[in-house]
Amino acid sequence: MLYFENDYTEGACPEVLEALVKTNMESLGTYGFDSYSASAKEKIKTACKCPDAEIYFLTGGTQTNKTVIDAVLRKYEGVIAAASGHIALHEAGAIESAGHKVITLPQKDGKLKAEDAETYLRDFYNDDSHDHMVIPGMMYISHPTEYGTLYTKKELEDLSTVSKKYNIPLFLDGARLGYGLMAEGTDVTLPDIAKYCDVFYIGGTKVGALCGEAVVFTKKAPTQFFTSIKQNGALLAKGRLNGVQFDRLFTDNLYLKISENAIKTAKKLKKAFKEKGYRFFIDSPTNQIFIVLENSKMETLKKNIIFSFWEKFDDNHTVVRFATSWATKEENIDELIKLL
């Protein structure tokens, strides 16, 4: 079988795995209070050009989204997100389970538009009964989005302007951040994200690590954020695991170097889809490719290829996703193209 279901079907990139093996017998501090975690944090600050950032390592994306949102929001506040946002659709109600409503707004190509957010916030506070409603306390976006699309620097700036106007933080989910940063044509860099977002995270699980995400508070973390991490089950006793991995990922630009492979292999696959006349659901510049398949063709391909169901298109067609990653091999792309 060929695996194109998602970008975390493999383990860790060899350099990260080698670093874990090399440091395996070292006795180190626990819960992230070790030399490798400290080194990784300094390297991330440098990469973000944000020397005052506060950085924490968590276990995975859902835990990270839930922990950050719950720690930042008061109990009567909710979080604004695009209707297609990951926290709105694919996290099993994790945010709501902590008592915070996900306030969904229309999406355009998977993105939350600044003008929609501002309209909502303006109308909300112009409603004399808003004290009886869930107070919007945060704006959430992801980069890349659930559809593999990307925000421009201007769009990030506009969202940041709205968030500052209404004094609510802008939170960026970077589960696939490496692929967004290496996409062709993007004008967004890691320092740009640190400039315009109050908090974001750098995804490791989907970009070369066995597991783990690095949360970056560009100004100051909420009080007792470390305690919130543990309370939400996102803290590793062997915090060295995340420290060693991110220390290696942010040495010699490895994080971006391995991300480039996902973009290169996705580009080759997209070209083949186009040449063979397949219909694209959306134009994604990153590692996620969304194709509209006839249901009969989908069943035929499923015999040899594992890909993701995305959504029903009509009675006879389905939107599916093919995802490449840091680990995708050229020969696997070639095999897939033959089967198309």
Image (cartoon, helix red, strand yellow):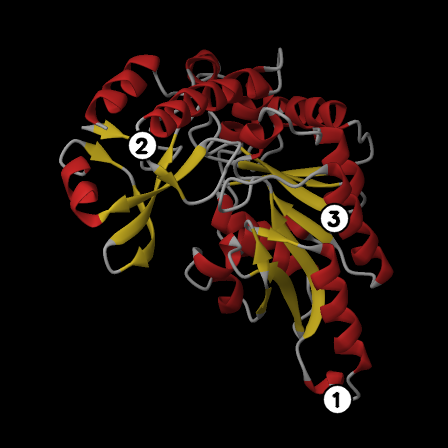
Q: Give the amino acid at mark 1.
A: Ser
- Residue in the foreground of this view, choosing between 245 and 192: 192
- In the rendered image, which residue does mark 2 sit on? 4
How dense is the environment of label 1, judged by Cα within 10 Å: few (below 14), some, or many (20 and up)? few
Q: What element carries label 3?
A: loop
How dense is the environment of label 3, judged by Cα within 10 Å: few (below 14), some, or many (20 and up)? many
- Residue in the foreground of this view, choosing between 330 and 274: 274
Asked if the residue at tag 1 contacts the one at tag 3, i.e. Cβ–Cβ closer than 8 Å, the answer is no
Marks 3 and 2: which is nearer the front?
2
Along the polypeptide, which appears first: circle 3 or circle 1? 1
Q: Where, by quadrant of the figure, is residue 128 drawn? A: bottom right
* Residue in the image at 54% along x and 22% along y: 244
- Is residue 133 among what the camera can see? yes
Measured as percent of width and height from the top left, residue 132 is found at 70, 87
Q: Is 223 above or below relative to 124?
A: above
Residue 221, label in figure: 3
Measured as percent of width and height from the top left, residue 36 is found at 60, 22
- In the rendered image, which residue does mark 1 sit on? 129
Q: Is mark 1 on a helix, strand or loop?
A: loop
* Residue in the image at 74% along x and 83% along y: 130
